[in-house]
Image (cartoon, coloured by chain):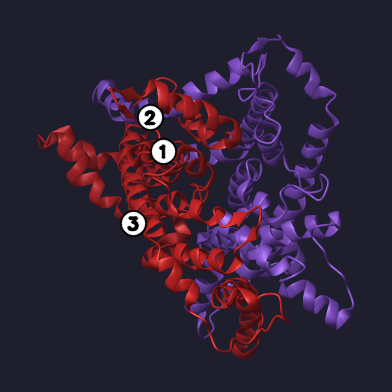
Chain colours: A purple, B red
């Protein structure tokens, strides 16, 4: 076995970059989170206020509301994406003419920049120029206005997220389904198991790691989403689509509450890491270690 | 198993494809409409396209320079992340270093940070600390290449790890017995075997860097501005220039489409973060 020195040399550039652009800014944010600070004020001095920011967070209705909205968003979006993604992945397991083309088309939204996805949906949904509110009104007499209706705005964001990210779920599940061994399925059919039993007792446990990996990626990204939502609704109307990422953005930029914004970030980052670590340790790591 | 009826499959997939493509099609429709027509009844069928927006965007020297910046930054960043990620994964998969699994998990936590708050420390570091003489890292292409590593390098490491773990150690050991140097083993034996994984990593990191908006909007002001930041410049207090915005979006979409088309086939295995052995 070679010496570990070579290993550390190979890792060094990665660690250096992550230290200078990830760790140092993080230390700074932690430092600021103990201060009251508005860098754009006439008197831009940091005032140390101990754990006041952290105390404030617990009773901050706006923050708690943004956490609630985010959890609701992640639940609705990720569950719908899993269901739709699974149906599509199963459909892709069969042979039919033009399969390659359909698969390419289905993957397209994945490569679109979040900011562009936001503007596309803005172009479709803005009441004065959008096509969807126009025809919903003309054909069904339904008035949809994402600028004034919280439900419409929230639903639009969920639909946009499903449109944007279902392809990722589909691809992950295709990869999982392709690698399933056929034997257990044949055995189950011989034993007379019905479709529902096969699905819940064989398919689900076997594709579980892929599902967890998808939830992991989506959770991580959903908690820091800003671009799409900012572009489409700006977090409104009211606080209907004010997800945690947007909330922090608003706290830092329009309100310039830099110290408090840092505190929220530290807490959110901590919660994200804990959630992802639990997922990783319980579901993904044991499997990776096996072989 | 149900019988395969190709007609049903095609109808089903046409419907799905329609839902997938419609927003992209609508983007295109908006981009070929003159501003005055935008507020009339929306037509689904395109008639008499107006190419003025395209001429305007293509003729804008500023936007062209944004495009060059985007190309340089995302290509540089993708290459850097893929190569460094490869080295890091080789180290993680081959050596028995203390705490390497914690280190592996730690890398991905860099991707979880809510970006808004990290903009200011990065801004301060890049103007005041990472500076030599007159040179400041802020608003430079190299600066953006390094900043994008915070989210792309962890992704590269997590995507490449299963590939490296999948290559048997015996292969390296046999080469060492034959007297090959470590450098030779890494570059001439292991590297070629990882090619499919490396290709997927390269393309995905490229797409992520190409699509990034928030960091670019804050950490550049003129010299290194990217195409995505050009979009928001057309949302002004006096109104939004929808047509121009849609056109820039189309321009942003095309290179990503071409690059993505190149690796369509390999993409499935690359997206799964190692949960599935392909």
* Residue B149 badge: 1
Q: Secondary structure at mark 3?
A: helix
Q: Residue at x 75, y 49 (%)?
A: A73
Q: Secondary structure at mark 2?
A: helix
Q: Is residue A118 visible?
A: yes
Crowding at dot 2, Cα within 10 Å, few <14 / some 14-19 / many 20+, comes out as some
**Within the image, what quadrant is residue B185 found in?**
top left
The image quadrant where one finds the C terminus of chain A is: top left
How far apart are labels 1 and 2 at the CA level?
A: 7 Å
Crowding at dot 3, Cα within 10 Å, few <14 / some 14-19 / many 20+, comes out as some
Give x and y (percent) for residue A147.
Answer: 80, 58
* Residue A17 badge: 2
How far apart are labels 3 and 2 at the CA level?
A: 25 Å
Q: Residue at x 63, y 70 (%)?
A: A88
Give x and y (percent) for residue A32.
Answer: 61, 17
Q: Residue at x 62, y 71 (%)?
A: B23
Q: Is residue A161 above or below residue A138?
A: above
Q: Nearer the viewer, mark 3 or mark 2?
A: 2
Task: Look at mark 3 in the image and give the residue it sits on.
Answer: B196
How far apart are labels 3 and 1 at the CA level?
A: 21 Å
- Contact between marks 1 and 2 (CB within 8 A): the answer is yes
The image quadrant where one finds the N terminus of chain A is: top left
- Contact between marks 3 and 1 (CB within 8 A): the answer is no
- In front: B139, or B162? B139
Crowding at dot 1, Cα within 10 Å, few <14 / some 14-19 / many 20+, comes out as many
- Contact between marks 3 and 2 (CB within 8 A): the answer is no
Q: Earlier in the sequence, mark 3 or mark 1?
A: 1
Chain where mark 3 sits: B
The residue lying furthest to the left in this view is B179
- In front: B240, or B3? B240
């Amino acid at each position: 076995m070679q010496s570990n020195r070579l290993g550390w040399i190979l890792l060094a550039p990665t660690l250096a970059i992550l230290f200078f652009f990830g760790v140092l800014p993080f230390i700074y944010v932690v430092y600021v989170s103990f201060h009251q600070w508005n860098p754009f004020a006439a008197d831009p001095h940091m005032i140390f206020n101990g754990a006041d920011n952290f105390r404030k967070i617990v009773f901050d209705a706006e923050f708690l509301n943004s956490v609630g909205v985010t959890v609701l968003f992640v639940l609705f979006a990720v569950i719908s994406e899993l269901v739709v993604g699974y149906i599509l992945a199963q459909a892709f397991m069969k042979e039919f003419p033009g399969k390659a083309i359909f698969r390419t088309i289905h993957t397209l939204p994945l490569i679109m920049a979040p900011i562009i996805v936001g503007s596309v949906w803005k172009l479709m949904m803005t009441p004065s120029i959008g096509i969807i509110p126009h025809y919903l009104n003309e054909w069904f007499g339904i008035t949809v206005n994402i600028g004034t209706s919280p439900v419409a705005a929230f639903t639009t964001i969920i639909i946009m997220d499903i449109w944007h990210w279902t392809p990722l779920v589909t691809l992950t599940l295709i990869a999982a389904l392709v690698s399933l061994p056929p034997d257990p399925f044949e055995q189950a059919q011989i034993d007379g198991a019905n479709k529902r039993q096969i699905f819940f007792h064989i398919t689900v446990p076997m594709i579980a790691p892929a599902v967890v990996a998808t939830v992991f990626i989506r959770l991580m990204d959903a908690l820091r989403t800003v671009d799409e939502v900012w572009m489409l609704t700006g977090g409104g109307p009211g606080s209907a689509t004010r997800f945690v990422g947007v909330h922090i953005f608003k706290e830092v930029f329009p309100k310039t509450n830099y110290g408090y914004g840092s505190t929220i970030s530290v807490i959110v980052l901590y919660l994200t890491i804990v959630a992802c670590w639990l997922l990783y340790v319980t579901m993904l790591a044991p499997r990776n270690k096996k072989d | 198993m149900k019988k395969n009826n190709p007609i049903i499959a095609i109808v089903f997939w046409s419907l799905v494809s329609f839902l997938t493509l419609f927003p992209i099609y609508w983007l295109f429709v908006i981009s070929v409409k003159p501003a005055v027509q935008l507020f009339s009844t929306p037509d689904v069928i395109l008639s008499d396209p107006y190419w003025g927006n395209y001429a305007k965007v293509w003729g804008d020297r500023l936007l062209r320079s944004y495009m060059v910046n985007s190309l340089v930054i995302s290509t540089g960043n993708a290459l850097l992340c893929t190569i460094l990620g490869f080295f890091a994964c080789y180290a993680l998969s081959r050596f028995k270093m203390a705490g390497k699994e914690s280190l592996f998990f730690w890398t991905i936590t860099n991707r979880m940070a809510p970006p808004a708050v990290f903009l200011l420390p990065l801004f301060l570091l890049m103007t005041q600390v990472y500076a030599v003489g007159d040179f400041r890292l802020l608003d430079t292409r190299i600066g953006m290449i390094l900043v994008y590593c915070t989210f792309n390098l962890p992704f590269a490491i997590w995507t490449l790890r299963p590939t490296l773990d999948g290559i048997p150690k015996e292969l390296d050991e046999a080469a060492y017995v034959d007297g090959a140097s470590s450098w030779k083993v890494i570059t001439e034996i292991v590297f070629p075997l990882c090619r499919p994984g490396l290709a997927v990593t390269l393309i995905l990191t490229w797409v992520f860097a190409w699509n990034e908006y928030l960091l670019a909007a804050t950490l550049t002001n003129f010299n290194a501005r990217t195409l995505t930041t050009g979009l928001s410049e057309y949302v002004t207090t006096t109104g939004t220039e929808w047509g121009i915005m849609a056109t820039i979006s189309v321009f942003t979409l095309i290179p990503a489409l071409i690059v993505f088309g190149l690796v369509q086939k390999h993409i499935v295995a690359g997206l799964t973060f190692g949960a599935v052995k392909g």
